[in-house]
Amino acid sequence: MEEKAIFKVSKNELQHQLQKVSKSVLDKSTLPIYTYILFELLENKKLNLTGSTTEIQIETSMEVIESNNVLTFCVDKSIINILKTLPEQPVTIEVTKTPNHNEGTASVTIVFSHSSGSAIIPGMDATFFEKMKETSGQSFIIPVEKLRRGLNMTRKFAGTDAMKPTQSAVFFDLKEDCITFVATNGAYMSRFKDESVKCPGCEGFIFKLDAVNISSSTLEGLSDIDVKVTSNKTNVNMSAGSLKITSRLAEGRYPNYNSIFPSDNNIEIMIDSKALASIINRLLIVANPLVALIKLETGMIDCSLSTSDEFSNKSAKEIVEVSSNMEITIGFSGSQMIDILSVIYGNAILAFSAPERPILVKPEINDEDCDLTLLSMPLILR
């Protein structure tokens, strides 16, 4: 039996909500249903929208202006491109589902109407669109600004090697009195601790990098709202108002990251992070692009940063008027240090112990209740 539904909705609100869920919709998939967005038109003028890759799912809901039926169907995400070209106005969507008796599914026709015309948009039966299960387990509350900050302070330091899933992720280390975000690619590491967030009775989890990036982008723009984070051994769910993000977790055991951070880096210099980044960027222009090696020599009055590329016969050196309590000569990756300095505002403190030991970088002043420490492995100087 043929089913029909007609509903009217605000163009701006529909576009806004579709852009959220579309972040987890694939352009191509071995399961074509997951290149579509799931629409669930419910009673009480409510519309649920879902996008999924089967690894990460984003759900949201909105009010419709009017509707005449309840119906579930899938819509091609090209509808977003049409919405972007229209000014704010009520738009009407008419959906017709016609059963394919031999296949046990239905063909879906979607007519999208606006003030100056209409368009037929590809649709698909929602029979085989399987939503990820509700996540039940331990939970804690974190303000959206603090969750977003924790992810942004760490995610760029995660690796991208699919064979090392625990490194291609951000680790949420949950304690009764704090939360610590950690990420590493094996060459450098970021550890961001926030003591204003309490997680009693919770165990840590490893949040996959793809899901981290999608979640961070989706949470952008939200403010003054708490996020409820619920996790178990396999999944994590983040809920903020009508927005729900569900993701599968990376499997494996996260290493004891605290043991990697040295406690005896007593040689220190302090320098403005933007000024140091500018110097390193200039040196990288002439550095060997494969290594990006920068040589740092500290002194009691000033320090020098230099680089050379013997293959192209180029070199550069800059002197910085910053003092150190001891002298040291050490090499590091300039491109890695640029990433590290990008999350530090104001003065940065660089701490060393020996040329072959890790370099620690911290902001001179941390935000209240927060502690950010970054680590970079040194490079061997010839």
Image: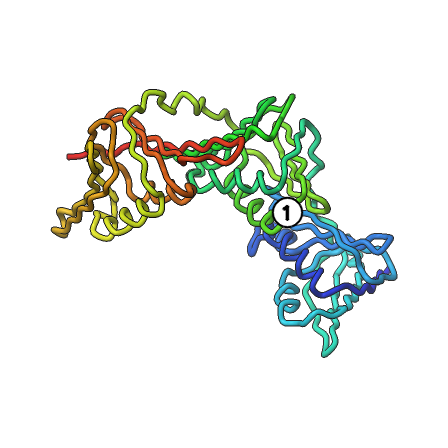
Element under label 1? loop
Q: Is residue 378 above or below residue 115?
A: above
Residue 99 or residue 260, whichever sits in front: 260
Question: Which quarter of the figure is the C terminus placed in?
Answer: top left
Q: In x, y percent, where is residue 71?
A: 81, 55
Question: Which image quarter is the N terminus in?
Answer: bottom right
Give the quadrant of residue 36: bottom right
Q: Is residue 236 visible?
A: yes
Q: Is residue 246 above or below residue 16?
A: above
Location of residue 204 with respect to 146 vertically, above or below: above
Q: Residue furthest bottom?
A: 116
Colouring style: rainbow
Label 1 sits on residue: 223
Q: Is residue 313 left or right of residue 133?
A: left
Residue visible at 64% across and 69% down in the picture:
82
Q: Which residue is depicted at the point 32% across and 47% down?
A: 275
- Looking at the image, residue 65 sits to the left or right of residue 223; the answer is right
Whether residue 166 can be seen here: no
The image quadrant that residue 381 belongs to is top left
The percent position of residue 95, horizontal first and vertical second, equals 78, 64
Total number of numbered labels? 1
Category of crowding for the residue at label 1, using alpha-carbon neighbours closer than 10 angstroms: few (below 14), some (14–19), many (at least 20): few
Q: Looking at the image, which residue is at 63% across and 57% down? A: 19
Who is closer to the viewer here, 116 or 124?
A: 116
Residue type at mark 1 is Ser
Residue 38 % position (x, y): 71, 53
Give residue 374's position: percent from left, percent from top.
39, 33
Whether residue 250 sits left or right of residue 119 in the image: it is: left
